Image (cartoon, rainbow, N blue to C red):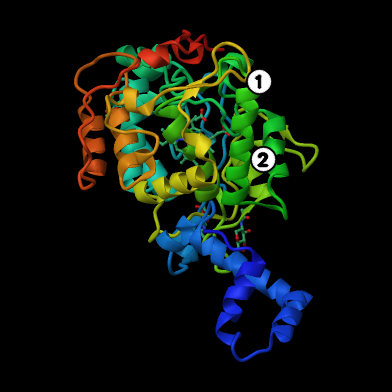
Amino acid sequence: MHFSSLDFLLASLVPLADAFPAAILEAAANDPAILARAAEISKTLAERQGGADAATAIFEPVPIFNAKAQYINVTQGSGHEYVAPGPDDLRGPCPGLNAFANHNFLPHNGYASVAQYVEATTKVVGMGPLLSIFLSALGGAIDGDILNWSIGGTPSLAQGGATGILGNGLTGSHNKYEADASPTRPDLYQAGNNYMTVTEQFQDMINHSPDGVVTLDSLTQFRSDRFDTQKATNPYFFNGPFSGVLVQPAAYTFIYRFMANHSAESPIGTLSYETVQSWFGVQGTNGNYQAVQGTERIPDNWYRRALEYPYETSYFLTDALNAIALHPKFLDVGGNTGTPNSFTGVDINDLTGGLFNAQTLTQGNNLACYVYQLAAQAKPDILLGALDALADAVGNIIGGLGCPQLKAIDTSQLEKLPGYSRKPVYA
Ligand code: HEM
Ligand SMILES: *[C@@H]1O[C@H](CO)[C@@H](O)[C@H](O)[C@H]1NC(C)=O
Ligand SMILES: *[C@@H]1O[C@H](CO)[C@@H](O)[C@H](O)[C@H]1NC(C)=O
Ligand SMILES: *[C@@H]1O[C@H](CO)[C@@H](O)[C@H](O)[C@H]1NC(C)=O
């Protein structure tokens, strides 16, 4: 629901209308001070009732900050000081995981076990355990050897062992995990790589974010513009049924929800240009940025989100749904047909065997049911056996949601799209 300031002003004056002559009401409606106050109140109301960060008020009702518990110590001698990656260390499209490896919250070589990912993501940034176990198990299932996976490309024999080298890692997971229209990384079929930070895209994110801070609002508008730009320029742009619907929103909301600094003055979190710069490994100043590959770094004096408010699946999906409410195109699964701006949508109803459609997908628990059940059908790099860990993770998330049973996905519509069917070549 949206109020214009004047609508709000008039609505608030209705009870007074009998008592005040029309002339006074009219004067009030023209008084700049009253109008400014009305604008302020209606903005607060709008924030409570909609907008990109409407979930905050629901999931963090009482602001909490505990400096001791939320401080992440990365000083010399902490064991988590920054160490730049060497030439053999694996790094990839995820700045959060790259930073964790640079700070030894994950093995420095970038190859880790599912349990290590869960430990790092829940402790360092406050990812909710269900979301963390799901994302980590999915990595093992589709990009690794079930137990372990790489945050970059394929591990060496020394890093991954005989089964590890069969998994292609996050960098090698285009359309399975790694998606088009990322914040700072390019589209694979447009740039020839999908993991290097593009300085211009980082600058674009900052340009979308006024007053020195990056917010969920600015990130959501940035995502909308990135989506349009990639559709208009990448002949093979593809918004995948899973990667586009679940991973793409994560790539944007994680920036604010996990990278913001927390304090007594700002318990929900403030993400300054300097803080986001550090996390993304970008040198220089606004207008003169320079991305330095592999240097993602947790800032000094940085405080994570409150322990009481982990960013769990329900919180994340509410953020994703709020973004869809603002920009319904985010749910357009499909892709370009080989030329820019030739976007052809895929019918969700056909894709899911009649289980969901574009109208019902945003209702109730349907989006959650859809994305998690779709993930459970994901194709692994190698078939090493049943993907029990992933099935368990999905089961734990959707257990209480009363999901209708997704039996199979019909990929025939997807196969007609070159962004889906093309065999990836990785740089
Ligand atoms: C096990 C947990 C995680 C997994 C499996 C994961 C996986 C991924 C993948 C596959 C991408 C590429 C998406 C794309 O192509 O757009 C990505 C991007 C991203 N991830 Fe993660 N991630 C995890 C945890 C985190 C954490 C903890 C943070 C924040 C501290 C984070 C922040 C981001 C951001 C900001 C991007 C977008 C990068 C860009 O294009 O600018 N991720 N992640
Ligand atoms: C951070 O770690 C360093 C090195 O171990 C230690 O000297 C310092 O007291 C720690 N800081 C806090 C606030 O715990
Ligand atoms: C893979 O993960 C398992 C289980 O956590 C662990 O025991 C093993 O050492 C890992 N393998 C490698 C090569 O890191
Ligand atoms: C986080 O906020 C605290 C309190 O305002 C401040 O002292 C600290 O320097 C901030 N850290 C970062 C990385 O901005």
Mark 2 lies on a secondary structure that is: helix
Residue at the disc numbered 1 = 233
Residue at the disc numbered 2 = 205
Q: Amino acid at mark 2?
A: Met
Give percent across and percent down for residue 313.
36, 46
Front residue of 84/272: it is: 272
Q: Amino acid at mark 1?
A: Thr
Q: Which mark, residue 347? A: none
Give percent across and percent down for residue 245.
43, 33
Front residue of 15/260: it is: 15
Give percent across and percent down for residue 27.
76, 81
Is 3 displayed left or right of 155 in the figure? right
Q: Quadrant of the C terminus?
A: top right
The residue at the far right in this view is 287
Front residue of 150/33: it is: 33
Mark 1 lies on a secondary structure that is: helix
Inspect this view and state whether residue 74 appears: no
Mark 2 or mark 1: which is in front?
1
Q: Quadrant of residue 375?
A: top left
Q: Is residue 141 above or below residue 372?
A: above
Q: Is residue 234 above or below residue 213?
A: above
Front residue of 384/110: it is: 384
Give percent across and percent down for residue 288.
80, 37
Instruction: Name the residue: 23% across, 16% down.
Output: 384
The residue at the far bottom in this view is 19
Q: Residues within 10 Å of mark 1 (few under 14, many from 20)?
A: some
Is 124 displayed left or right of 365 in the figure? right
Q: Residues within 10 Å of mark 2 (few under 14, many from 20)?
A: many
Q: Is mark 2 within 8 Å of ligand 1?
A: yes
> Of label 2 and label 1, which has the lower sequence position?
2
Q: Quadrant of residue 338?
A: top right
Marks 2 and 1: CB-CB under 8 Å?
no
